[in-house]
Amino acid sequence: MAHDSGTVHESIDRRSVLRAIGAAGAASIAGCSGGDGSGGGGSSGGDLGERVQSLQMEYWSDYGGFTTTQEQMSPIISQGVNELGVGMEVVPVSITTQLSQMANDANRANNISFTWWVPAADRLDPQELLNNMRLDWAGANGQSNYSNYADCEYTRLLLEQTTAETQEEREQGIYETIARMAEDCAIGNLAPVANIGAWRTDMVEMGGIGNGGIARSNAEWAFKSSTTNGEDMVVSINPIATETSNWMTHSAAMPEAMWQHMIHSPIHKYNENFELTELLGSVDVVSSQEVVVELFEDATFTNGDPITAEDVKFTFEQIQRGGETGAYPGAAPVPYDAIETPDERTVRFTFTEPYIPFSRTTLMRWGILHKESFEAAGAVENPGDAQFETPIVSSGPLEVTELQRGQRVVTEPHDGHPTYEASQPIIFEAYRNEETMITALEAGECMISPEISPPNAERVNNEIDNAQAEFAATHTAFNLQYACHTAPCKFTEFRKAVAATVNRQQMIDVAMAGEVDPEMYPTYISQNHPMFPPEDMLYKQAEDPTGNPEMARQMLEDAGWGWDGDGNLHYPPDADLDPLWPEGETPSAEDFPCIEDLGLDP
């Protein structure tokens, strides 16, 4: 069992802990206050301000094994918040609804979003995640600053590292950017995300697992595994990826990764062991402001058309169009100067300023689009409304021959891919929840179940014959995304107090079988990330992974917060409880002068 170094903890039986926290968890989910009416709460003395009302924490209700993990962690988070004298209501919400509301600042009843980030290989460069906290993405503008964190110094550091001339300069800038976010405790790290999947050993010869694990963010196993009897490979998924043929509009990254990396292919990407692999062409980073792609001669779409430089140019122009209209949530801003096509197989990207992240982020994330199909579907005029008839022309090793919305995606191998060839057709079969996925695996109705929870991995290994589960800790993390623009989470000391109370070790023992180390620094990424800053640069959420409610309460008391006779937390008497900007608006230059100084457009 993995633990924080230097600290010894007794092994905790998961079922026993779940029983022990049952009553506290039920009270927390019901939104009960932390006080018991006995007058046991301390008091800061003097006058008390307004009472802190019960918090609302939303989590994603429709994400298979990850939902199971969140549901097991949530009562422990609530239990920690109760130690502060504040109740918490835990609310399940679909990921599409939750992200849309938070991106548009449309649900101020929610104080904390309990989220996690898909450990896609292009996030081995943290640019995308750091962008999510920039000031000009906060407020009602459709951008992905789900925390509504608005800090001038953070945004200045972020933009400076983005335009660094060298990788060394940029890496130092990333460290400083993350350190600023950590000092503000703008997000609360809990534990690394784990890619856990299972397969039927009597039905599949598995390959391509590596460090990426059995998850759709690691496409390799789909092409490097084969069925033992020559039948179609059946893979269980949640329904999100089946709900639209306009895959660019997905806000959930696992479904998007399935379409972008299994059905389509980017120019290059990291393989299962995070080694750079050329798929459709070679990439030459000429300088910090120029990248040149040379397509392979044998790269073809699934309909037989050659993949040309014009298709590549169209792809990144279309991503930019969809990003600007808010239709493609994953589209990051790129300072293009020009995208040129000197010949049929050459694409030259130039930038108006240094942009080192491009080749390892944007260029890796997006599968190459068939220009003719997108134009015919009206995607140029309306990126969010385009729909595609089957068979869908794709650039990857799989062609979608049938799409039954909410049920399945049926694919056939494409033999015109320069790098990969799927061994057999793959059917991505949708299941409403993780329990039905595991039941189907046990019955042999599906052969591979990616993205399951640790308890079900234990069940597979201990209770299901001819099945095996495998676990891989990753470079992204489970996070508490505080609503940094509204009370009480707009107050730094309150965010730090919440972060300090959480018993991360208990969460890991209960929900993740004790298989990972707690995340003690509020950095957005996990400590497994290759660009994690030196620890001495970072604010630490608590000294011990079991949490420290006494330290948390002391931090609040030092900042003027107090408790009434029933143990309920109150704001300082002079606390300004107004939101940082009105609902339906964005941060203003009057309140945040750097908006003009940095040339931002919120």
Image (cartoon, grey):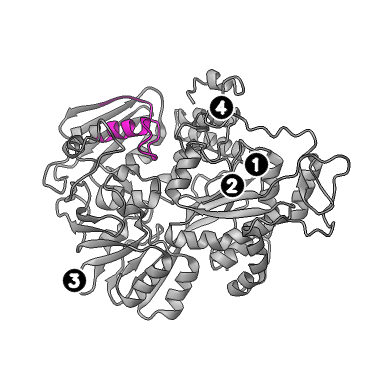
x, y percent for residue 93: 49, 52
Reading the chain from its start, which is encountered first: label 4 or label 1? 1
- Location of residue 65 with respect to 526 vertically, above or below: below
Tell me what residue is drawn at x 59 percent, y 41 percent.
483
In reply to whether residue 448 is colored magenta, the answer given is no
* Residue type of the residue flagged with mark 4: Pro
Decide which of 54, 253 is in the foreground and name it.
54
Task: Tell me the SS state at disc 3.
Answer: loop
For marks 4 and 2 on the same chain, the one whose residue lies earlier in the sequence = 2
Residue 158 horizontal side relative to residue 267, left or right = right
Depth check: give the residue in front, 96 or 193.
Answer: 96
Which residue is the site of mark 2? Answer: 112
**Separation of marks 4 and 1 at Cα, in angstroms:** 17 Å
Residue 344 in percent (x, y) is at 15, 32
Real-space Cα separation, disc 4 to disc 3, in angstroms: 58 Å
Image position of 512 (left or right of 340): right
Which stretch is magenta? 315-339
Callout 3 amino acid: Gly
Report which residue position mark 3 lands on: 230
Choose mark 4 or mark 3, whichever is in front: 4
